[in-house]
Amino acid sequence: MIKDIIKLSIFLAVACALAAGILSVTYVATEGRIQQQKTAELNLALSNECIPGACSIERKKDYFIGLDKKRRKLGYAFRVYPKGYGGTIDMVVGIDLKGRVAGIKIISMNETPGLGMKASESSFLRQFTGKTFKSPLKAKKDVDSITGATITSQAVSDGVKLALTKYRSLR
């Protein structure tokens, strides 16, 4: 009986060590490709959704600048991380040269499926287009919130306000 327990324990320890080793090798082998994919996704979001018309993106320490073909500025984008219901929401907010929201892209979030996850839909995000630093951004009052996801709706509003504040500090 004791011998069986020891044999089983050794077997399980070896199996766990082997599985951990395989996972480690897989992580190391795919880490670079995953990072490249995330960077490509971010660049696509910046040029297509956050700073429409940008041909290239210039990275600064805390923000991005969208440039046209002649390398003229089209706008800025800020990555912000407001706290939603399910945790941090990773989002990018594009702002044009007049200080108006040009577009938003939710990079990742962990909100409630069917409720808070609707915050990433363009039908929700479009309502922020054109908002400025002076625009009130209170969920249910100034912003149509998602039914059953007021915390998430306010978090996105807070992220937009934070990006507008960062833009204003550049001026």
Image (tube, rainbow, N blue to C red):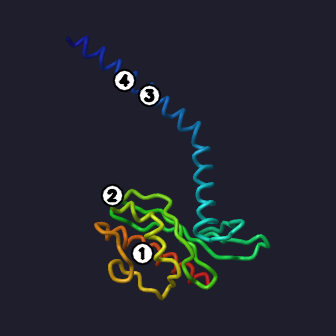
Q: Are marks 4 and 1 in contact (CB under 8 Å)?
A: no
- Residue at the spot of label 1: 158
- Residue at the spot of label 4: 13
The N terminus - image quarter: top left
- Residue at the spot of label 3: 19
The residue tagged with tag 3: helix, strand or loop?
helix
Q: Residues within 10 Å of mark 4 (few under 14, many from 20)?
A: few
Residue positioned 59% across, 56% down in the render: 41
If you read the primary sequence from the N terminus, does the residue marked by circle 2 or circle 1 appear first?
A: 2
Q: Are marks 4 and 2 in contact (CB under 8 Å)?
A: no
Query: Of the residues shown, which amino acid type is indicated by label 4?
Result: Ala
Q: Nearer the viewer, mark 2 or mark 1?
A: 2
- Residue at the spot of label 2: 112
The residue tagged with tag 2: helix, strand or loop?
loop
Q: Nearer the viewer, mark 4 or mark 2?
A: 2
Q: Nearer the viewer, mark 2 or mark 3?
A: 2
Residue positioned 39% across, 66% down in the render: 83
In the displayed structure image, the side of residue 160 where residue 30 appears, left or right: right
In the displayed structure image, the side of residue 42 where residue 10 appears, left or right: left
Q: Nearer the viewer, mark 4 or mark 1?
A: 1
Residue 133 in percent (x, y) is at: 50, 85
Asked if 114 appears above or below 167 in the picture, the reply is above
